[in-house]
Image: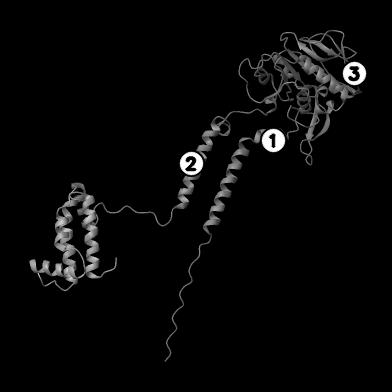
């Protein structure tokens, strides 16, 4: 009769992921989440550099980024206005505004006050190129009703904007304003010349036929309108003649604090929020401290092992608990030295029992232990008992207890 084979022991189960893999996944997740938060916070600024609209951050043909680059190259102070400045911050600055066709007079009234304001009107219908971010297709001129004329109603009513068709290279005559009358500015080739007129505008720069390309408001002398954006935009600045005239216009009108280009009307304003405040000085230091604290707490949590300790009974059961409680009471009462005699008695009783003299008692037991100790060259147990009974401090008790312990080991032959 054969004995049935025992069932093989079940294979030890292995965890699905090792601790290192879990830690790596957590770290990757935290880094990815932090990157997402930063990118989400600064997404408007990151998109602005690739936005092909007609504003000072745009690198497209209808944008004005080239003007800011050239001014900085000439060491002229240039700032980009992305939020409402404090009152009086632009009192010595030329504010350049590039409103789109949909900007209203209500939005124009919210512009900050500056030493002078130059409003550059839109001209082109353009659409982004899908395969070339930052580039645009030029689809033609805006209709006269779309040339931001309603935005000018907060300054002067009855404004009219028109385009003289055809390629031309006009010579602009200065009629006043920031320039001495009688001067001229040469302009490179333009695809149509856009002009402005109206009862509330005084021509400042005009072509040979007297059509105003730049005009000054009569009721708001610090407000100027440049009807021809190709004098300042990127496609116009590629011509050196036009670029020279554009820099002359801007630097002549500039204030002591330089030139500021507004992009809030183009939808690129920057609003303060808690996320941005947490990532910028002076609050960045507090954010880093919070992240460091969270990292240390996470590391402490990962360093734990085993199950969480559960709260025990208020009063433990068993002999061990009884001994511990009794020892605690003795410590609280500071009666440890009084235990010296009892400890010596228990040690001598253990040695007596181990040596076969348990049947003896009284002085006979003491004599028997003394003779046994003398044969081994050890101290007289009665002297040790007397010394233990006379201790006064915890240090003395410890010293006597060590002597008694070593004496017992020698008497009984036990290992330590």
Q: Is residue 81 above or below residue 344?
A: above
Choose between 117 and 265: the one closer to the eye: 117
> Do we see residue 318 in this rendering?
no
In the rendered structure, the answer to whether residue 157 lies left or right of residue 385 reads right
In the picture of the structure, the residue carrying the numbered disc 3 is 170
For label 2, the crowd category at 10 Å Cα-Cα, with few meaning under 14, some 14 to 19 and many 20 or more, is few
Q: Quadrant of the C terminus?
A: bottom left
Q: Is residue 300 above or below residue 94?
A: below
Residues at circles 2 and 1 in contact by the CB criterion of under 8 Å:
no
Tag nearer the camera, 2 or 3: 2
- Residue 324 x %, y %: 23, 55
Residues at circles 2 and 3 in contact by the CB criterion of under 8 Å:
no
Q: Quadrant of the N terminus?
A: bottom left
- Residue 264 x %, y %: 67, 25
In the rendered structure, the answer to whether residue 252 lies left or right of residue 319 reads right
Q: Is residue 261 above or below residue 300?
A: above
Choose between 328 and 174: the one closer to the eye: 328
The numbered mark, 1 or 3, whose residue comes first in the sequence reads 1
Q: Which mark is residue 47?
A: 1
Say which residue appears at 77% left-offset and 16% top-offset.
225
Q: How far separated are the C-alphas under marks 2 and 3?
A: 67 Å
Is label 3 in a helix, a strand or a loop?
loop
Say which residue appears at 51% left-offset and 34% top-offset.
286
Q: Which mark is residue 293?
A: 2
Say which residue appears at 16% left-offset and 66% top-offset.
349
In the rendered structure, the answer to whether residue 323 lies left or right of residue 6 reads left
| Extreme residue toward the bottom, this view | 1
Is label 2 in a helix, a strand or a loop?
helix
């Amino acid at each position: 009769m054969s004995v049935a084979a025992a069932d093989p022991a079940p294979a030890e189960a292995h965890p699905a992921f090792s601790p290192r893999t879990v830690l790596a996944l957590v770290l990757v997740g935290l880094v990815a989440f932090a990157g997402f938060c930063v990118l989400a916070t600064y997404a408007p600024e990151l998109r602005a550099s690739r936005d092909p609209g007609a504003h000072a951050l745009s690198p497209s043909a209808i944008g004005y980024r080239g003007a800011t680059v050239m001014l900085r190259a000439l060491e002229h102070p240039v700032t980009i206005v992305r939020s409402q400045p404090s009152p009086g911050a632009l009192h010595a600055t030329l504010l350049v505004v590039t409103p789109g066709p949909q900007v209203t007079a209500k939005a124009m009234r919210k512009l900050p006050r500056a030493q002078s304001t130059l409003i550059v009107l839109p001209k082109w219908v353009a659409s982004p190129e899908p395969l070339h971010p930052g580039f645009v297709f030029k689809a033609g001129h805006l209709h006269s009703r779309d040339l931001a004329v309603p935005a000018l109603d907060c300054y002067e009513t009855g404004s009219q904007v028109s385009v003289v068709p055809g390629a031309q290279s006009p010579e602009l005559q200065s009629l006043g304003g920031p320039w001495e009358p009688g001067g001229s500015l040469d302009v490179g080739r333009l695809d149509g010349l856009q002009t402005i007129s109206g009862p509330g505008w005084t021509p400042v720069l005009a072509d040979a036929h007297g059509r105003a390309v730049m005009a000054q408001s009569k009721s708001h002398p610090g407000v100027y309108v440049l009807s021809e954006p190709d004098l300042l935009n990127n496609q116009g600045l590629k011509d050196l003649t036009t670029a020279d005239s554009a820099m002359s216009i801007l630097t002549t009108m500039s204030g002591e604090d330089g030139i500021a280009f507004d992009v809030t009307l183009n939808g690129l304003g920057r609003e303060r929020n808690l996320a941005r405040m947490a990532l910028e000085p002076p609050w960045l230091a507090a954010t880093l401290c919070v992240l460091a604290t969270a990292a240390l707490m996470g590391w402490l949590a990962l360093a734990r092992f085993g199950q969480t300790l559960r709260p025990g009974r208020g009063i433990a059961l068993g002999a061990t608990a009884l001994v511990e409680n009794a020892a605690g009471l003795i410590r609280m009462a500071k009666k440890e030295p009084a235990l010296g005699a009892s400890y010596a008695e228990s040690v001598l009783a253990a040695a007596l029992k181990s040596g076969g003299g348990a049947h003896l008692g009284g002085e006979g037991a003491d004599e028997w232990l003394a003779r046994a100790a003398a044969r081994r060259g050890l101290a007289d147990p009665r002297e040790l008992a007397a010394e233990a009974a006379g201790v006064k401090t915890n240090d003395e008790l410890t010293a006597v207890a060590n002597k008694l312990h070593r004496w017992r080991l020698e008497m009984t032959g036990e290992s330590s």
